Image (spheres, coloured by chain):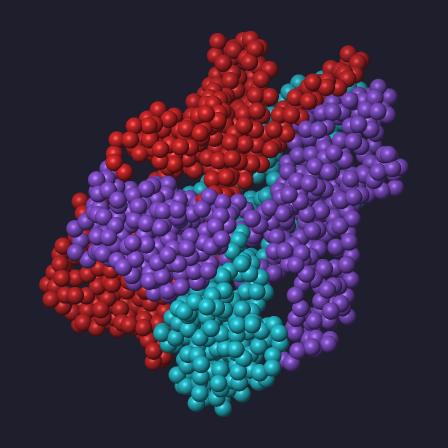
Chain colours: A red, B purple, C cyan
Amino acid sequence: MNKNSSNTMALAPNTSNKRETVCIFGTGDFGQALGHKMIQSGYRVVYGSRSTQISNLIPKDAEVLGHAEAAQKAAIIIIAIQRQHYNFLTPLAEVLRGKVLVDISNNLKLNQYPESNAEHLAQLLPGCKVVKGFNTVSAWALQSGTLDASRQVFVCGDDVEAKQMVMNIVRALGLTPLDKGSLLAAQEIENYPLQLFPMWKFPIFLSLGLTAFFFLYCVVLDIVYTYIYEKKDFSFFIAITIPNRVCPVMALILLALVYLPGIFAAIIQLYRGTKYSRFPDWLDKWMLCRKQLGLIALAFASLHAVFTLVTPLRAFASWRTGKGIISQVLNNKTEPLDHTNAWLSDSYLALGILGFFFFVLLGITSLPSVSNNVNWREFRFVQSKLGYLALILCTAHTLVYGGKWFLSPSAYKWYLPNIYILSLIVPCAVLVVKFVLIFPCIDKRLTQIRQGWERNPKYSK
Amino acid sequence: MNKNSSNTMALAPNTSNKRETVCIFGTGDFGQALGHKMIQSGYRVVYGSRSTQISNLIPKDAEVLGHAEAAQKAAIIIIAIQRQHYNFLTPLAEVLRGKVLVDISNNLKLNQYPESNAEHLAQLLPGCKVVKGFNTVSAWALQSGTLDASRQVFVCGDDVEAKQMVMNIVRALGLTPLDKGSLLAAQEIENYPLQLFPMWKFPIFLSLGLTAFFFLYCVVLDIVYTYIYEKKDFSFFIAITIPNRVCPVMALILLALVYLPGIFAAIIQLYRGTKYSRFPDWLDKWMLCRKQLGLIALAFASLHAVFTLVTPLRAFASWRTGKGIISQVLNNKTEPLDHTNAWLSDSYLALGILGFFFFVLLGITSLPSVSNNVNWREFRFVQSKLGYLALILCTAHTLVYGGKWFLSPSAYKWYLPNIYILSLIVPCAVLVVKFVLIFPCIDKRLTQIRQGWERNPKYSK
Amino acid sequence: MNKNSSNTMALAPNTSNKRETVCIFGTGDFGQALGHKMIQSGYRVVYGSRSTQISNLIPKDAEVLGHAEAAQKAAIIIIAIQRQHYNFLTPLAEVLRGKVLVDISNNLKLNQYPESNAEHLAQLLPGCKVVKGFNTVSAWALQSGTLDASRQVFVCGDDVEAKQMVMNIVRALGLTPLDKGSLLAAQEIENYPLQLFPMWKFPIFLSLGLTAFFFLYCVVLDIVYTYIYEKKDFSFFIAITIPNRVCPVMALILLALVYLPGIFAAIIQLYRGTKYSRFPDWLDKWMLCRKQLGLIALAFASLHAVFTLVTPLRAFASWRTGKGIISQVLNNKTEPLDHTNAWLSDSYLALGILGFFFFVLLGITSLPSVSNNVNWREFRFVQSKLGYLALILCTAHTLVYGGKWFLSPSAYKWYLPNIYILSLIVPCAVLVVKFVLIFPCIDKRLTQIRQGWERNPKYSK
């Protein structure tokens, strides 16, 4: 969508009113890309390099000088060299005194060094104002102008003015600076580009584990059991039938797990009689990954929907339909419409559709750009009210669909309960406790606590 | 997605170059949360409190003093107390003179007081520079760092510099300030977090009303009529069959209602011969909620699609299929393929799919982050050209599907027209008038008017 | 979603601390709308006009004066007149000296004049600081407050301070300024609102061309051939059967075309032994439209999914099912379940569903607001790893579905290969070459090259 790629952007070599001069130490990949982009944005760029005879990929409008001369020409020096070469900067300490040094380095793994690169630089050159920044942007993105990934540049530093100067450059390059605080935040900023969905790790491992368990459970009960006792080979169930049993179970359990921590929190607050005490750590962490759990639940629910809708296309389904009709014909009788069955089948389908509909609404409102456009009350309304509505509808869908198996002995092969029965435990528990919690007497007390009331006020307020 | 939760953010207690000191009056929930966040962002925080012996939830790095001493330490004072206690500030007027007071209060209901809290504060302390802000952020969001909901902080105030100072704090906390103008905007800002989808109210009530009407209409014609005259119980139609009749009707009518105000506007402009006169109020309001109408129509269309796709899974559908085949067998004849029928069935399905496809495209481009990336011409192209294409395709889909009923007497049970016929009135009217409006002679005149031409220029220009 | 429409925004006529005065030359549509919005945001507005007796649509709080007097009252003058009338400004050169002129004009077509309007203005009035801006916002959007389309205002200019003043106004109006550099960027900014999806043009024309070709190919082989040799009329295949053959083919080919340029780039880098040389132009352009190709492929895949899911609803499908069952009955035998067939049918459905699932995930992460929230490593993980997974699954889906036709002579009507065979060429080629490229020996060399290693270093570094 970014139609204003940098290569069509205006260069401003002759305009009298140029931006300030910026010095870049290092003529590597990122130094080159950054220099190009800065010249395009109207800055005068001076490279500091060991050799002034330089690759023809250095932007033409840039000057290349020795490190000391280059540094003297600018108030801001971008250190585009690797941490292990920082030591060569110490002889330049006098020249660099008072200058703003921008540390743009990245490490190869999380917490590679005891202190962050930027703090290391600040210790080496105590007379300089070190600012961390630009490490979250890729050279390729700068060069191509296709900043499809993040435009955010995290910036931190102890000197507010130096930070402001760097943030102005960031803005001038068409990126979005985000002030992350003092230089102590550098460790976090340096770790950021090395992270791979940190908030998603626990939810994804949890769902993979549960999925594997339920998959095996179904294989044993549906394929192995049938093969042993009925001598029928239903191994092809692995492709669609069993995934379509595991997906709805996972969706329902994960959706319930989104609302379970809220239930726990309410119980803890009621029991302690105050909100002024921290929740246990595991509960805090659980609450922070509710969104991820919910989105994974939505993915499973979507897969369930598609797996269900393709049923009539399966060779097995058309074979079964044909078999049913032919047996009716051969018995020379037409079965009348079973109204109970029609009601049940239409009900669970309708419940499932509505539950899925509200679930998708929840998913859409969790898109960053949509949630940025709703206020706090609207967000809570959608995530809490609509969320519980979706949970109720999906639980009812499962109950109506699988209800008949609860009492049927054939649902307990090898004395193991059917997977539908297992899937209902958590959601039903959540709904029952939530139902108790909204009883007026309990709800009133909970509201009081959340507004600051305490049963045993321990602290003077 | 916000992986940089505040609890991992760097505290900066020892850095020499700290941000300015901020004073917070009130040690309640929001005062605590805001203080924590500010200290994390490098501010020095002083609490002003009646009692200096204080809850251990106050951030450790914060000082707690009496109100007057605390106020003297900072240029900015955040008033984290409720409006009914504002009066206790009047004795401090001398100390507060010239300071920036940030009113962060919220009310419990819309327009609770004649003037906004911020204006009330400004009247009580005329020597202070009052800025409204932070009221749209929740304490929980500040504390947990999971700003899933809005990061926008609306700010208003009469003093531009004071406002700028507050906006800088907002930015430093990682939030997005949005200048809403002078302090007169405080009422609006205070109402904002109390609103619950104000733009959605009318479209939602309209659709609920219409849905209820059409649902009853279908129940009467499809279930009651059949029960009375044919003695058949089709009550299970309530679950899927009837919703799947109401949803497409609602989708089509609401989609047509999105384009109807544009038609009215064009007619009014042609009739008046000028664009320099305001549209009637109802038309202005209608035009402003077109997006919401369109999205609700899309929701109905999606439900219709899913309801339709589950048809083969219904017990009723498989019973009907079986019955049809068995009757062929018992009559000992195989029916040949009815080509007209095959054409009709494939056509309305294809038209519906394409219409739905363009409809979904419209929905995607109305996502805030997508529409921010298209220019005005592209937005108009999508919303107008693709929108009309979707309307034409969906109307054609309905015509091909329901067309055969127009002349069939069985479609007029109890002399009432079938619901398909009702649903076509508005879209066909819109399309016919639009077709007339794009006639070259009329279109040319309309373009002239929209470019500023007037039939009877009343004003000197 | 923009609930804070301008008409409810506070006017600030009596506040002492007003913003600066802004002068607007021209009382046309855009001048009026901009004036209204500025007054609402607290600016004092003076119109410069030939006639001071003026339309009653000029905001009431605005003054209307002659051009010279109006210009003297403000430091910023917004030139809301058309380029062809710029000449009348030259007599005012003395009055305008040193002022900031904001050129908001748009042209009717791309590159209408040799130099941009803003540069033309700067040449006419060399003593003024010309800033380009506001041209991407529509008068209607300003007036109605429904800025559904872009809130971005591109700003450029040679004078940094003048630009800053204009950007402050943009921010105060609730819009987002974006600094595009020096005045040379004005041409680009003026072309921006005239563009209609420039990045989409090539991908869309390519897909339209390919679609037309494959559609005709299918019509010839499926309808014409059948009609000539089997005397059967399957013309109704045009509505669903053939589209559902073309869509998956297009989706697969376009998805493979997304990954093909990356393959080419790797081969070129390996061959040249360096990354420090530009790719050919066509490859650069191809790489920049990969996202668009991918999204169009996703659209085709979605259409394919829906076309497939409606299959059981088609009159043709139910006729064919009935025919199959009746023939079994008449032959008085029940066919047993064909296990190979059940495996095949379930496998390709499951592969297709999973492939589509990952494809949709890719689509969601390409939404601007989502991709803004992932770091570079996460973006690459999703777009590269998940993308190849989707390609592998979709290719396998097609292979399992169409594999049996490879050796069947009936797939080569008129010696032409079946469309499935054609569709597999590009994806299989991409996957095979990619498989070779990830061999450790080749991958290691490629990684070295991408980290800066060169086989024949030509430049001193």
Q: Can residue A314 be seen by looking at this rendering?
A: no
Q: Is residue B208 left or right of residue A396?
A: right
Of residue B372 and residue B104, the one placed in the foreground of this image is: B104
Using the rendered view, name the quadrant where residue A85 is placed: bottom left
Q: Can residue B372 be seen by looking at this rendering?
A: yes
Residue at point 44% right, 29% down? A444
Residue at point 53% right, 53% down? C3
Up the image or down, C2 lies above or below B267; here it is above
Up the image or down, B283 lies above or below C50; here it is above
Q: Is residue A88 left or right of residue A164?
A: left
- From the top left corner, tell me how far across and down residue B108 is, in percent: 46, 43
State which quarter of the image contains the C terminus of chain A. top left
Of residue B440 and residue B47, the one placed in the foreground of this image is: B47
Q: Is residue A390 left or right of residue B67?
A: right
Up the image or down, B269 lies above or below B118; here it is below
Of residue C10 and residue B412, the one placed in the foreground of this image is: C10
